[in-house]
Amino acid sequence: QQQVKQSPQSLIVQKGGIPIINCAYENTAFDYFPWYQQFPGKGPALLIAIRPDVSEKKEGRFTISFNKSAKQFSLHIMDSQPGDSATYFCAASRGGNMLTFGGGTRLMVKP
Amino acid sequence: GAGVSQTPSNKVTEKGKYVELRCDPISGHTALYWYRQSLGQGPEFLIYFQGTGAADDSGLPNDRFFAVRPEGSVSTLKIQRTERGDSAVYLCASSLMAARNEQFFGPGTRLTVL
């Protein structure tokens, strides 16, 4: 079954903290794992993505850690800011086909 | 350049009516995807076009839903005999080509069926 499970559903951190959002997948054929950020009333915006041949990818304050054997990946946001408050979705796809999304994590960064 | 655009941004209709939702992908993007997002949930795949043809329509919930992309650019999602359960945000995404994976989303159309 093509399913991506995301946790936690919501997360509150103080400014400067490092929120961590976790995802687990079942389909070993998935070969592309992006993270999207969504603000209310807007479409999801691509943040960062990773392929299973690397264990970590960093872009600015955002880092993806990938554990192929455990079929898990996570998003870390360094030095979080109130402007990072949004809903974050992990996703997975195979061969450029449709994205299968997790259920989302609502992040609040307190000033 | 311009991103993915979707019109209308909001659509309110009555149960049983027909609606059309439009998506303009990023210029030059050959792959186009439709997703549906219910409140508090992640987007769910509906249909995917590579060029003019539907490469995968396995996500369409039933035969009331149909999408076209006649010239390989603009796409229209059509919903017949709308039901209250169709209320959701309909998202469109495009990709340079399917093999590139990166999908860029539009702002969505919020459909409300009364």
Image (spheres, coloured by chain):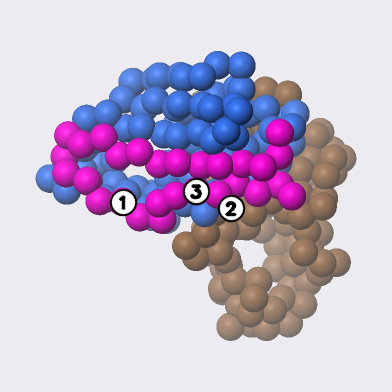
Chain colours: A blue, B brown
Mark 2, secondary structure of its residue? loop
- Residue B13 lies left or right of residue A84; in this view the side is right
Q: Position of residue B73 (x, y in %)?
A: 73, 37
The answer to which image quadrant residue A29 occupies is: top right
- Residue A28 lies left or right of residue B9; in this view the side is right
Magenta stretch containing residue A97, yes or no?
no
For the C terminus of chain A, give its image quadrant: top left
Q: Which residue is mark 2?
A: B43
- Residue flagged by tag 3: what amino acid is it? Gln
Q: Are marks 1 and 3 on the same chain?
A: yes
Nearer the observer, disc 2 or disc 1? 1
| Residue at 42% over, 45% down | A88
Q: Which residue is mark 3?
A: A6
- Residue flagged by tag 1: what amino acid is it? Leu
Q: Position of residue A17 (x, y in %)?
A: 20, 36
Mark 3, secondary structure of its residue? strand
Q: Residue furthest top?
A: A54
Q: Chain of mark 1?
A: A
Q: Chain of mark 3?
A: A
- Residue flagged by tag 2: what amino acid is it? Pro
Nearer the observer, disc 2 or disc 3? 3
| Residue at 65% over, 71% down | B86
First along the sequence among labels 1 and 3? 3
Question: Could you tell me how far apart the alpha carbons at marks 2 and 3 are, in whole angstroms?
Answer: 13 Å
Q: Position of residue B5 (x, y in %)?
A: 56, 44
Label of residue A11 in the image? 1
